[in-house]
């Protein structure tokens, strides 16, 4: 993952900082790598001091407070990249401390990609002092999936009984965000253990999701199958900016975990370049992206300026 991606992931999860996208847009392109690391470290330390305080977050939910859920996991993924790019030792120590406090366990749902995202930070820890204890619960979690692979389609149908969380396809990667959450962990686990089964499962599901949700004409991912036929008031397809940002950030995580020359790595690199070109083309003159990427005029604002949530991820 690039340093810019790490910085923006930290900004996205430290959303109370009103700098958010605006700060990243205003950062001079000539800024040195060291200056970028120092800025990211300041932001990280600010957030670390507030991990148990959600009073500054406008839409905090139960998952916001859960140290194993996807919201905090995205922050910790950014932290691992920051640590790898020369941040001070306290950044890496905070990752190890978090993992130990979590007992190296993923969140509750065994198949749900969001609940597996935190394992990316545990696998980093396994290589940086956490050892076998940091790796074992992650291996157990993915071994369960390999032993009991889900059998369902990728169609996103919310049942009348049970609601959203009972959606059958959530046992697979049937929404585009999932490509950030779980596949990088499976690929890294394959690298650390030498067991190709994790890699093969991840690659198979990555392409299943891509073949299902990726629009080759628009070069963007639908959030899930519910959006295939949806159109806005002007008849345009609807592509969620933040969701496509998750995909691009996920690709940045996945590609380095495959050997150079690997046919699937080459395909993922081509996909990354193709999507990046489209995202660049949909960026607005003010540096932001609209929530629906093909509708630039439909960009909500708040008192601090344009809403930054759709921008933090695509900007990575």
Image (cartoon, rainbow, N blue to C red):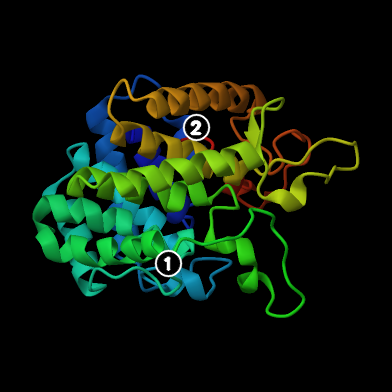
- What is the quadrant of residue 3 in the picture? top left
**Residue at 39% across, 24% down:** 263
Q: Which residue is mark 1?
A: 69
- Of callouts 2 and 1, which one flags the residue occurring earlier in the amino acid sequence? 2
Q: Residues within 10 Å of mark 1 (few under 14, many from 20)?
A: many
- What is the quadrant of residue 70 in the picture? bottom left
Q: Which residue is mark 2?
A: 25
Q: Residues within 10 Å of mark 2 (few under 14, many from 20)?
A: some
Residue in the foreground of this view, choosing between 306 and 315: 315
Rendered location of residue 167, percent (x, y): 65, 67
Position of the N terminus, as image quadrant, is top left
Label 1 element class: loop
Give the mark count: 2
Inter-mark Cα distance, 2 to 1: 28 Å
Q: Is residue 258 left or right of residue 128?
A: right
- What is the quadrant of residue 141 in the picture? bottom left
Rendered location of residue 114, percent (x, y): 47, 61
**Residue at 50% across, 32% down:** 25
Q: Is residue 43 visible?
A: no
Residue 180: mark: none
Q: Is residue 315 visible?
A: yes
Asked whether the beta carbons under mark 2 and mark 1 sit within 8 Å of each other, the answer is no
Rendered location of residue 276, percent (x, y): 54, 25
């Amino acid at each position: 993952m690039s340093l810019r991606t790490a910085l923006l992931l930290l900004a996205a999860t430290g959303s109370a900082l009103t700098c958010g996208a605006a700060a990243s847009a205003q950062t001079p392109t000539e800024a040195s790598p060291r200056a970028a690391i120092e800025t990211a470290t300041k932001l990280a330390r600010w957030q670390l001091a507030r991990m148990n305080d959600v009073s500054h977050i406008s839409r905090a939910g139960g998952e916001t407070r859960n140290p194993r859920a996807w919201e905090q996991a995205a922050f910790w993924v950014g932290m691992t990249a920051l640590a790898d790019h020369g941040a001070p030792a306290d950044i890496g120590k905070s990752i190890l401390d978090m993992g130990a406090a979590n007992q190296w366990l993923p969140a509750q749902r065994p198949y749900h990609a969001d609940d597996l995202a935190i394992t990316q930070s545990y696998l980093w820890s396994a290589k940086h002092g956490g050892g076998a204890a940091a790796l074992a619960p992650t291996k157990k979690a993915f071994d369960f999936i390999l032993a009991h692979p889900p059998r369902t389609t990728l169609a996103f149908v919310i049942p009348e009984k049970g609601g959203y969380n009972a959606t059958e396809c959530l046992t697979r990667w049937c929404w585009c965000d999932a490509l950030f959450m779980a596949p990088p962990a499976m690929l890294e686990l394959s690298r650390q253990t030498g067991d190709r089964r994790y890699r093969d499962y991840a690659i198979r599901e990555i392409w299943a999701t891509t073949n299902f949700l990726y629009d080759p004409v628009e070069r963007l991912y639908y959030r899930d199958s519910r959006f295939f036929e949806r159109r806005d008031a002007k008849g345009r397809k609807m592509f969620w900016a933040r969701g496509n940002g998750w995909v691009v950030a996920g690709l940045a995580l996945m590609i380095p975990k495959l050997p150079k020359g690997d046919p699937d790595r080459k395909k993922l690199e081509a996909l990354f370049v193709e999507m990046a070109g489209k995202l660049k083309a949909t960026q607005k003159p003010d540096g932001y992206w609209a929530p629906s990427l093909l509708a630039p005029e439909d960009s909500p604002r708040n008192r601090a300026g344009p809403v930054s949530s759709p921008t933090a991820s695509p900007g990575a």
